[in-house]
Image (tube, helix red, strand yellow):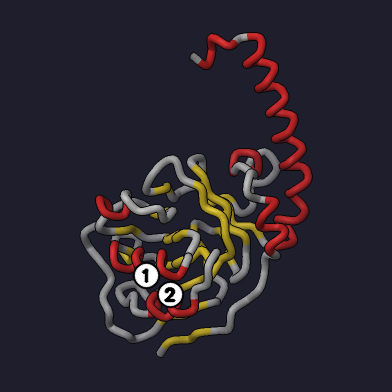
Amino acid sequence: MFAIRSRVRGISPELLDRYREVATSTLGHFTDIGAITDLTPLRRPTRLLGSALTVRIPHLDGSVIREALKMAEPGDVLVIDVAGDERRACWGELRSYAALRKGVAGVVTSGRVTDTAELARLRLPIYSRGPSSLTTRALELEGEVNVAVAIDGVAISPGDLIVGDDDGLYALTPERAEALLAPALDKQAREAARRQEAMASNPEWWR
């Protein structure tokens, strides 16, 4: 039996917009909490930003992902906890088409993905443990949507901010995202100034 909870409004559109230029490496200078280090993007360059719509599947049965896709709204990031089965792919080509139709911002799974040649051609950021030909099945036994999940020891709740780029991936509660924003933007502004100085004095470095 599926356990599907109501949507959670976590990150405000204003806060989400202000995070558009924040790099994960900048966040990594301020906090270890929320860093998901064992997943990698399927394609580079990549940028992922959105609000978590969480899913927990019971190992072999990936049926509840379909229910999450029905609930998904533009800007959601599907965060899929595969309950420890890290050999198996719960995400592939056809689910990616469904996600793109709904305007999903990206996908994060603690498991693997399949159909990687096709996924790499799509403009859908996907983070996973890599490819696998072994997949979940449509058994329709059980699963959960919009519950607290954990990926690599990082607790993720519905509505949390998900930030990803080529360097890594972060999950932040709305409160933590708000607290980290000002120092992160200040650090990036100072780094940008130093970059401009270096480019002006040593333009040959960029040729």
Residue 45 image offset from top left, x and y in percent:
44, 40
Quadrant containing the N terminus is: bottom left
Q: Locate residue 10: give its quadrant.
A: bottom right
Label 2: few (<14), some (14–19) or many (≥20) C-alpha neighbours in 10 Å: many
For residue 162, above or below residue 139: above
Residue 151 image offset from top left, x and y in percent:
49, 60
**Residue 69 numbered tag:** 2
23, 139: nearer the viewer:
23
Q: Examine the rendering and report whether any part of residue 88 can be seen.
A: no
As helix, strand or loop, the secondary structure at mark 2 comes to helix
Left or right relative to 56: residue 140: left
As helix, strand or loop, the secondary structure at mark 1 comes to helix
Residue 128 image offset from top left, x and y in percent:
39, 54
**Residue at screen point 41% across, 64% down:** 100
For residue 199, above or below residue 117: above
**Residue at screen point 27% across, 58% down:** 114
For residue 15, above or below residue 60: above
**Residue at screen point 38% across, 77% down:** 66
For residue 126, above or below residue 136: above
**Residue at screen point 49% across, 74% down:** 72
Q: Examine the rendering and report whether any part of residue 77 can be seen.
A: yes
What residue type is disc 2 on?
Leu
138, 117: nearer the viewer:
117
What residue type is disc 1 on?
Ala
Residue 122 image offset from top left, x and y in percent:
35, 53
Q: CA distance from mark 1 to mark 2?
A: 7 Å
> Which of disc 2 and disc 1 is earlier in sequence?
2
Q: Are marks 1 and 2 in contact (CB under 8 Å)?
A: yes
**Residue 98 numbered tag:** 1
Residue at the extreme left of the image, as rendered: 133
Label 1: few (<14), some (14–19) or many (≥20) C-alpha neighbours in 10 Å: some
115, 36: nearer the viewer:
115
